[in-house]
């Protein structure tokens, strides 16, 4: 991945590694010597060349440390990252020569992007820089290797994030879910101290680069001022909040019906964190059994179809002759393994087919050979899905631990969006190989997911033939809303927390309290029992130890509806927006590919204009899409006591809390 697109952990944005051939006589540590009389244009040309040359040292080290977690790969990844961040600091230092000088717009943009290239700004002090990369690699390793163990001696059993997530997805046993949720949140407790230091160090790095703090630096990558970006997120949230509040109200009613009014909500009408089908309550799709408005109206059970595919793969693997001399038990283990891989690849081919149907190329052969599709059985890996551009020249990979579920299927479509973006802008100079902004990168695959209408799913055999009815429409809308609408406040609150940590308004002794106040305020979610400062619940979400900015996902959840609407227009769709699938439409594909090819070469507003005709992010397409569901919810919720008292979070936690305003 280019750390930007992909979610690569440590140094997020374009992340390249520093080449080992760094010259000792460099004027600035970590960068090669400055040729006399170098112009700004020449400087950028040199950075692009050095960037390309050194890039794969970092990606290879990080790929290894994420797919083979141990102390050696961790040390190598930290070292590669240290070299890269040192090189980056060197370039940034060298770029200061050109401040205030006339230069071409392209060069000015490249210099700006250079300063925003990492989400992990590193202090100039080499010792602190080394400390930072070690901390970052260790935290991500802790997350990746995290497991929750119970019992003693022979009775000891440990469960990883996949197994714990499975409990929340499928069990409706209140206590089993609570145990799984709490269990996963023990993994992050030991990260607290590291995170405190991490925040100090990235702040120092950001200040060294001229930003007030790391949060301000994160907010600077949007071709507008950091303050304007923050205001944009508030504006967009205000647009969609009424829809979220209706969905929240409906969900709470269903939870109360299932678990009783005492257990189905927490203090003042908030949703219990462990009952939402997801460790972070960011996607409620796993509660389909409970939330489905009209059971049986239109069959949208993609999970069942995927399970059937997995079963068929297992049957055919079992039918193959096993290794000579292998026991029946060994043969069964191997068959299960081969079947899991076959199913995962089949799901990925299904996603690839959508992109190819738009006229995009097939994924390169190396993708199929080098990607991690399923969880290896012999080692710890970071299972959190990511997409990687290893060399800016076609070595692209995804890293997932795929299981046959609808959530995983849509994540594959999401990841391939990153990969196709990478492939499309590989022709750009390295500094422009990124999304128009990071929310664009996150929105590419999700725009395709919006095109996975019931009709599309039926056409590829993932659901049965669809009947048309009002009930089926509401079911289909609910299915999308549980993923897309439920996500919105979560997409916002994570960086509200980190911005506060970085600007000092959230202090280490109030990390957890502030986290739950934000969860209460934005999501209307609360833990069922107190979470005091012995916990570090933010660290239980990958992007915190992995240091991936999160506002990008909030923006993506708005942008993807804008992109979808434009591509539907390009495809000549005329009916209601939610009925559109641009699957197979070459005109839509051409428009999309053209946008992807622009990468980060121009302000995102221009890129957006070329695709959509407008230059602003805007949630009206979200509201247009969900209009039928929103009216249905309003009617359905009429008479219910909707909303929640976010101050209830204070009651649920023991520490004194400044009360947040009611959501
Ligand atoms: O992290 C991801 C992707 C990789 S960029 C799997 N997502 C966010 C998350 O899982 O929290 C996609 C949606 C939100
Ligand atoms: Zn992503």
Image: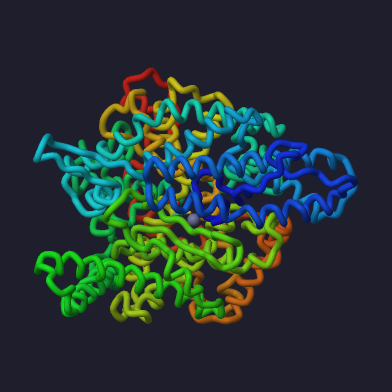
Query: 512 or 369, which lies in front?
Result: 369
- Percent position of residue 513, x then y: 40, 26
- Percent position of residue 277, x then y: 29, 50
- Residue 615 in view in this figure: no
Query: 9 or 290, which lies in front?
Result: 9
Res 649 quadrant in image = top left
Residue pictured at 49% horizontal, 78% vertical: 583
Residue pictured at 48% horizontal, 46% vertical: 491
Query: 466 or 126, which lies in front?
Result: 126
Res 376 quadrant in image = bottom left
| Quarter occupied by the C terminus | top left
Q: Which residue lies furthest to the top in this view?
A: 656
Query: 110 or 472, which lies in front?
Result: 110
Res 598 quadrant in image = bottom right
Does residue 471 sit above or below 57 in this rendering?
Answer: below
- Residue 301 in view in this figure: yes
Query: How was this image coloured?
Result: rainbow
Looking at the image, residue 39 sits to the left or right of residue 370; the answer is right
Residue pictured at 48% horizontal, 59% vertical: 387
Does residue 10 sit above or below 583 in this rendering?
Answer: above
- Percent position of residue 84, x then y: 61, 44
- Total tally of numbered discs in the picture: 0
Residue pictured at 89% horizontal, 43% vertical: 101
Looking at the image, residue 602 sits to the left or right of residue 238; the answer is right
- Percent position of residue 555, x then y: 56, 51
């Amino acid at each position: 991945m280019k750390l930007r697109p992909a979610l690569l952990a440590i140094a997020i944005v374009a992340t390249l590694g520093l080449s080992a051939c760094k010259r000792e006589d460099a004027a600035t540590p970590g960068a090669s010597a400055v040729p006399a009389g170098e112009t700004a244009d020449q400087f950028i040309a040199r950075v692009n060349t050095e960037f390309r040359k050194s890039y794969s040292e970092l990606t290879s080290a990080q790929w290894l440390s994420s797919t083979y977690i141990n102390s050696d790969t961790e040390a190598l990844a930290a070292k590669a990252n240290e070299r890269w961040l040192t090189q980056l600091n060197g370039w940034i230092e060298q770029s200061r020569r050109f401040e205030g000088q006339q230069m071409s717009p392209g060069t000015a943009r490249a210099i700006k992007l250079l300063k925003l290239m990492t989400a992990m700004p590193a202090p100039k002090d080499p010792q602190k820089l080394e400390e930072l990369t070690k901390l970052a690699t260790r935290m991500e390793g802790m997350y990746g290797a995290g497991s929750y163990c119970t019992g003693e001696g022979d009775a000891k059993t440990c469960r990883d994030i996949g197994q714990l997530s499975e409990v929340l997805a499928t069990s409706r046993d209140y206590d089993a879910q609570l145990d799984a949720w709490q269990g996963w949140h023990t993994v992050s407790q030991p990260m607290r101290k590291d995170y405190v230091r991490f925040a100090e160090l990235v702040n120092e790095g950001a200040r060294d680069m001229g930003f007030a703090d790391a949060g301000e630096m994160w907010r600077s990558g949007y071709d507008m001022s950091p303050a304007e970006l923050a205001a944009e997120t508030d504006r967009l949230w205000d647009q969609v909040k009424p829809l979220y509040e209706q969905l929240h109200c409906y969900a709470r009613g269903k939870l109360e019906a299932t678990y009783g009014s005492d257990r189905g909500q927490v203090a003042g009408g908030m949703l219990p964190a462990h009952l939402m089908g997801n460790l972070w309550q960011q996607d409620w799709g796993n509660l389909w059994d409970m939330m489905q408005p009209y059971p049986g109206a239109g069959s949208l059970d993609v999970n069942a179809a995927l399970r059937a595919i997995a079963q068929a793969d297992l049957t055919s693997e079992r039918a193959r002759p096993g290794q000579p001399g292998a026991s029946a038990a060994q043969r069964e283990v191997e068959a299960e393994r081969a079947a899991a891989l076959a199913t995962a690849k089949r799901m990925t081919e299904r996603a690839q087919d959508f992109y190819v149907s738009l006229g995009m190329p097939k994924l390169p052969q190396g993708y199929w050979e080098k990607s991690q599709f399923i969880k290896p059985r012999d080692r710890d890996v970071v299972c959190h899905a990511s997409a990687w551009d290893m060399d800016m020249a076609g070595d692209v990979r995804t890293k997932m631990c795929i299981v046959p579920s609808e959530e995983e299927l849509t994540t594959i479509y999401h990841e391939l969006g990153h990969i196709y973006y990478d492939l499309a802008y590989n022709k750009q100079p390295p500094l422009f190989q990124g999304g128009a902004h990071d929310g664009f990168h996150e929105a590419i695959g999700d725009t395709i997911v919006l095109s996975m209408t019931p009709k599309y799913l039926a056409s590829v055999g993932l659901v049965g033939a669809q009947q048309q009815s009002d009930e089926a429409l509401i079911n289909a809308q609910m299915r999308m809303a549980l993923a897309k609408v439920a996500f919105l406040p979560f997409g916002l609150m994570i960086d509200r927390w980190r911005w506060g940590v970085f600007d000092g308004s959230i202090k280490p002794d109030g990390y957890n309290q502030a986290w739950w106040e934000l969860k209460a305020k934005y999501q209307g979610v609360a833990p069922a029992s107190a979470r005091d400062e012995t916990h570090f619940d933010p660290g239980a979400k990958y992007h915190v130890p992995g240091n991936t900015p999160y506002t990008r996902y909030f923006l993506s959840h708005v942008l993807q509806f804008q992109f979808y609407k434009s591509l539907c227009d390009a495809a000549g769709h005329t009916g209601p927006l939610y009925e559109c699938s641009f699957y197979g439409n070459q005109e839509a594909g051409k428009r999309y590919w053209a946008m992807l090819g622009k990468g980060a070469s121009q302000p995102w507003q221009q890129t957006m204009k070329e695709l959509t005709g407008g230059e602003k992010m805007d949630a009206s397409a979200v509201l247009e899409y969900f209009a039928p569901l929103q009216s249905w919810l309003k009617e359905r919720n009429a008479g219910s006591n909707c909303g929640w008292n976010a101050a209830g979070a204070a009651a649920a936690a023991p520490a004194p809390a400044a009360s947040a305003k009611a959501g």
